[in-house]
Image: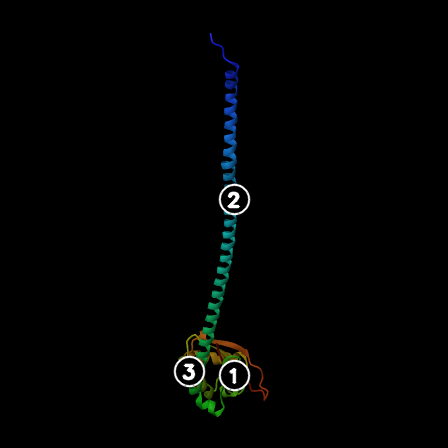
Amino acid sequence: MFRTTPTRSMRQDWLPWSLSIFGACCAVFVLVRGVLPARSANEQLVSKLARLEAELARSTQSAQAERSALEQQLAQAAVSQEQLKSVERARAAMEIARRDLSQALGRQLKSGAVQLEEQNGELVVGIPHDALFAPESTALAPAGRVLLRELARSIQRLPAEQVYRVGGRSDAHQRSIMRFLELSGKVPARQLAAAGVSPPSPSGPSRRVDIVLVP
């Protein structure tokens, strides 16, 4: 019968421990050289990704704000351009009206019975009250009817959207002028508007009747 020597028995006892220590060392090596650096790298990548997303969000917000500002500027420019076109159209219409009225009322303008002038950007046809109405009456005089008929012919040649503000010594005088222009002069009622009572003339009780072309 053979007996195990003490040396071989000690080797057999230490072998499992040696393998365990070796395995633990390998695990620590893998952890230190592989898992921990990979985890750190992942954390760095996640942090970098978060920073990039934050920068992208700020850039997107800035771009949206800049786009909104540009759109607002474009809208304002379009409005300004449209206003400029409107002013140009109004000036062109006023110049056409000035030429037409100068021809239609040429005789009255030459004699001084009628004044054609521009006031505050508006074209004004000024007619003495006595040239239109009989004394102390709201009825139109024959000469006044002739003059208003000439004016109505000129109005009919001008743009249909043009509005005329009619003044006068009283509301009754204004209604007489507007009614004659509408019924006898064939001027649409939508183009006529009462201006209110005109102020007294500095030279006397007679007042001028102003018929204003509203831009």
Q: How is the image coloured?
A: rainbow
Rendered image: mark on residue 209: 1
Disc on the earlier residue, 3 or 2: 2
Disc on the earlier residue, 1 or 3: 3
Relative to 30, residue 135 above or below: below
The amino acid sitting under disc 3 is: Ser
Position in image of residue 97 (x %, y %): 44, 81
Q: How many marks?
A: 3
Position in image of residue 87 (x %, y %): 47, 75
Disc on the earlier residue, 1 or 2: 2
The amino acid sitting under disc 1 is: Val
Rendered image: mark on residue 154: 3
Write the residue at 53% across / 14% down.
Answer: 6
Relative to the observer, which residue lies in front, 165 or 46?
Answer: 46
Q: Residue furthest left?
A: 157
Relative to the observer, which residue lies in front, 9 or 73?
Answer: 9
Write the residue at 52% across / 86% down.
Answer: 129
Q: Determine crowd level at label 1: few under 14, some 14-19, many 20+ residues with C-alpha closer than 10 A.
A: many
Classify mark 2: helix, strand or loop: helix
Relative to 113, residue 167 above or below: above
Write the residue at 50% across / 79% down.
Answer: 122
Position in image of residue 111 (x %, y %): 48, 92
Q: Which residue is mark 2?
A: 44
The amino acid sitting under disc 2 is: Gln
Relative to the observer, which residue lies in front, 6 or 140?
Answer: 6
Q: Determine crowd level at label 3: few under 14, some 14-19, many 20+ residues with C-alpha closer than 10 A.
A: some
